[in-house]
Image: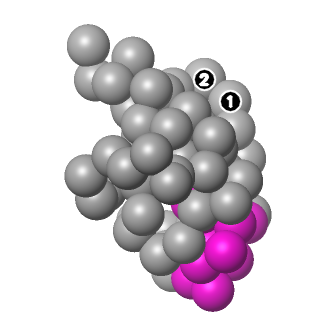
Amino acid sequence: MGLAFGHGADYRHHSNLLFVENDKDPWQIGTESVASGGSVRRFVAAGGAHHQDLRFPSPLDAPGVSAARRVVEETVR
């Protein structure tokens, strides 16, 4: 996957990738350089913490986290 995950990686020859990052996750900088386009996409969930989008939904979830889950569901279908 290129040189390193997100840092200088070349995704031009990849397809059907969705990177979901949460803006309160310190690791979210790992895909800052991933350009969205074609079937390689990046979604940043406002208000989300590390892996929060992978946990069970909660009424306390930030709207951005709920939106991230919808994007994943729509992408997988």
Counting every numbered tag in the picture gives 2
Residue drawn at x 61%, y 51% as measured from the top left: 62
Is 18 drawn above or below residue 5 in the view shown? above
Residue drawn at x 68%, y 30% as measured from the top left: 37
- Circle 1: residue type: Gly
Instruction: Decide if residue 5 is in sight here.
Output: yes
Is 40 drawn above or below residue 55 in the view shown? above
Name the residue that disc number 1 marks: 37
Element marked by disc 1: loop
Is 17 drawn above or below residue 53 in the view shown? above
Q: Quadrant of the C terminus?
A: top left
| Residue 56 relative to residue 11: left or right | left
Residue drawn at x 47%, y 75% as measured from the top left: 50
- Disc on res. 17: none
- Nearest to the observer: residue 65 or residue 43: 65
Span shown in magenta: 21-32
Is 38 drawn above or below residue 7 in the view shown? above
Q: Position of residue 3 (x, y in %)?
A: 53, 78
Distance, label 1 to label 2, CA atoms, is 4 Å
- Circle 2: residue type: Gly
- Nearest to the observer: residue 59 or residue 67: 59
Q: Callout 2: few (<14), some (14-19), or many (20+) C-alpha neighbours within 10 Å?
A: few
- Disc on res. 38: 2
Is 56 included in the stretch rendered in magenta? no
